[in-house]
Image (cartoon, rainbow, N blue to C red):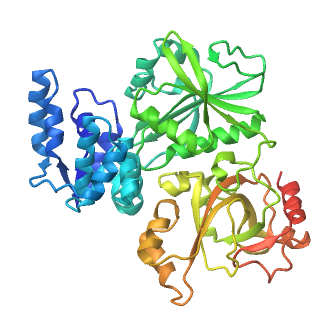
Amino acid sequence: MKVLLDTNIIIHREASKVKNTDIGVLFNWLDKLKHSKYIHPLTIEELNRNIDPKTVETMNIKIGSYNVIKNVAPVNDTIKQVGNKVDITPNDISDTIILNEVYSDRVDILISEDKKIHRKAKLLGISDKVFKIENFLEKVTAENPELVNYRVLAVKKVDFAAVNIQDTFFDSFREDYAEFDKWFNKKSDETCYVCHSDNNLTAFLFIKLETEEENYSEISPTFFKKKRLKIGTFKVTENGYKIGERFLKIIFDNALQYKVDEIYVTIFNKREEQERLIDLLKIWGFINFGTKATNNGVENVYTRQFNKSIPINLENPKLTFPFFSRNQNIFIVPIYQEYHTELFPDSILNNQSPKDFIENFPHRNAISKVYISRSREKNLQSGDIVVFYMTGGKYKGVATTIGIIESCMTNIKNSEEFLKLCRKRSVFSNDDLLKHWNFYPNLKPFIVNFLYTYSFRKRPNLEWLVNNGIIQDYESVPRGFAKISADQFDTILKYAY
């Protein structure tokens, strides 16, 4: 496969000081997959415009290890029209010419962190060929599990004192906050969440509960008095495992536990990693509230309203997750034991070992997941509620989890589309997915995208479900999506919580 690397990727890769640690993981995968790495002649021209002759000389030596596109594709009228809508600077025009290589099928894919390139790719209908590092890593990790030769350790809650403050992971924080090391050391007895990959720190989260008496004088406009959860420190090095989404689940779970009214974060927008984090927060309902002025500069403030009184967004449940509307349809659906904890790591049962469920696959860490079904009931709408029942008989079969439906996709054209829709968020391998697709030639499966929302504290078993009228009898355990009433759902919730 020919992979074209945008100029911003090359600059980060070959810089004397690597600031984007995702780059190493990216190139490791390109080498493992034996993909050919290409650069565009315009990339060389841009690198040669550096004012430092020594830097130019060094860069020219390093880029000798890449293939340079020999014959540049002619720019056709369609891509010119898209460029005219978006391009402002000479660099924008160069990016359009680079994107043209993908549009003209001269290369297979393009990897770029440039937002305008992705915007243009969407307008051209080639988004599936243009990747950010994060998206590419998710794709190859999911498609090639046999090539993953290291394990991502489960997210752990530890004291600050157990974390190596000298780890280069924290260099970006030191650049942004002069007092970072002093602040970190003072937190030695407080807790944080960490995740390691191949013995390297790849994710860190610190959250803080704040009362209505907190001083917010540095924030503009002024915060009203509320009980808040502050995301104090949050950084994820992307490696294809969707750890950022896993950490968001932790944030939301803590916000529920502490019954806060709002979640907020203050963050600079200086680097790509911060832009990615901001984009992730926006996807999950955070909005730009204002700014915070400190000695380190002006940070952006993002907030997320967090209480049951907020209007539920049925069209895009992520924006108001984990809250849902009881006015929607409610379903109960079975999931086999062998897939249950793979898909729902927080719903692990007492007789299962956490060591067997280390979160080293994207589907385990993601909040947004995929369920494959051949249910007769297909009328599932965004915002509907689903209760997952782990099969196992009278005593071992238990209801464990609530999900919120995002979408139901019933008109899947072929196996290639099916694989593409399932791959990153399903528990199944490609071979297993193909078996599902081909098992009943005249009854193809459909896909339900849903949000992994709550794990029950107490798990009602099948006997309880039958005795309390949720399921009619032991022979009537649903094989697909089965509707239950709001009263039946309330009965489950009263027991489970």
Q: Position of residue 163 (x, y in %)?
A: 49, 27
> Which residue of the protein is positioned furthest toward the bottom in this rendering?
442
Point 50% across, 37% down: residue? 277
Q: Look at the picture and state if 201 lies above or below 122.
A: above
| Side of 128 relative to 340 (left or right) | left
For residue 200, which quarter of the picture? top left
Point 63% across, 42% down: residue? 285
Q: Look at the picture and state if 250 lies above or below 442.
A: above
133 or 435: nearer the eye?
A: 133
Point 23% across, 61% down: residue? 104
Q: Position of residue 439 (x, y in %)?
A: 51, 85
Q: Position of residue 88 (x, y in %)?
A: 32, 37
> Which residue of the protein is positioned furthest toward the top in this rendering?
295
Number of callouts: 0
For residue 448, which quarter of the picture? bottom right
Point 78% across, 59% down: residue? 459
